[in-house]
Amino acid sequence: MPTKREQVLDAAIEVLGTGGSRALTHRAVDRSADLPPGSTSNYFRTREALLCGVAERLEHRDRADWETLNRALGPATVEHLIDGLALFLTHATTTDRIRTQARLALFGESQTMPALSESLRRGHQRLRAWAAEMAAAVGMAATDTGILVDYLDGAVVHRLTGAEDGKDPREALARLTRALLE
């Protein structure tokens, strides 16, 4: 059961992911969370504090998803890595689309908020570390893992904008992964 603070943050993710950064106000989050007016500002006094809270909540929820994904995939093999990357990409752009759109909105906001920028940087470093751990288990160099993560970042944007809508990402991920392992 989520705490009230987590409920506020999940509502903020929903507002940000569906309406963009201009839609994100304390009042809109209160409405989305079905909480009395002023509830969001009790937890997050400023917009910057709310945005940093959203970044941290996204990271927490991502970590839980990654751990579930790793348990579901079985032993570390190249096929495991490819399947995991394809699952991650598909999940981020379908089931988790709103969360992913919220994260992209945070990137724009972070250009003028150093604390938010730092929070996003930490989250991205953890994503790279997770990917590096999976890739190292099948013999991929850490520098090549960065190429794979950068590809995933771009693929997420293309899928969200409809450029790769509906295509199975596994074939392209398999080609790239195998090429990086050579």
Image (cartoon, rainbow, N blue to C red):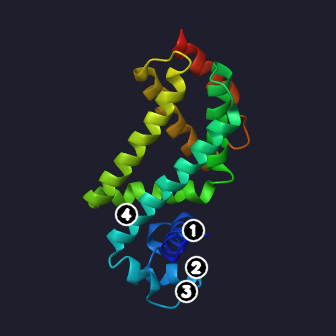
Mark number displayed over residue 32? 2
Mark number displayed over residue 14? 1
Residue type at numbered disc 2: Ser
Does 107 sit left or right of 37 as displayed?
A: left
Q: How far apart are marks 2 and 1 (CA)?
A: 8 Å
* One can see residue 34 in this view: yes
Badge 4 element: helix
Graded by Cα atoms within 10 Å as few (under 14), some (14 to 19) or many (20 or more), the crowding at tag 3 reads some
Residue type at numbered disc 3: Leu
Give whichever of discs 4 and 3 has the lower sequence position.
3
Q: How far apart are marks 4 and 3 (CA)?
A: 20 Å
Q: Mark 4 points at which residue?
A: 52
Q: How far apart are marks 4 and 1 (CA)?
A: 15 Å
Q: How far apart are marks 3 and 1 (CA)?
A: 14 Å
Location of residue 16 with respect to 25 vertically, above or below: above
User: Do the residues under discs 4 and 3 have CB atoms within 8 angstroms?
Assistant: no
Graded by Cα atoms within 10 Å as few (under 14), some (14 to 19) or many (20 or more), the crowding at tag 2 reads some
User: Do the residues under discs 2 and 1 have CB atoms within 8 angstroms?
Assistant: yes
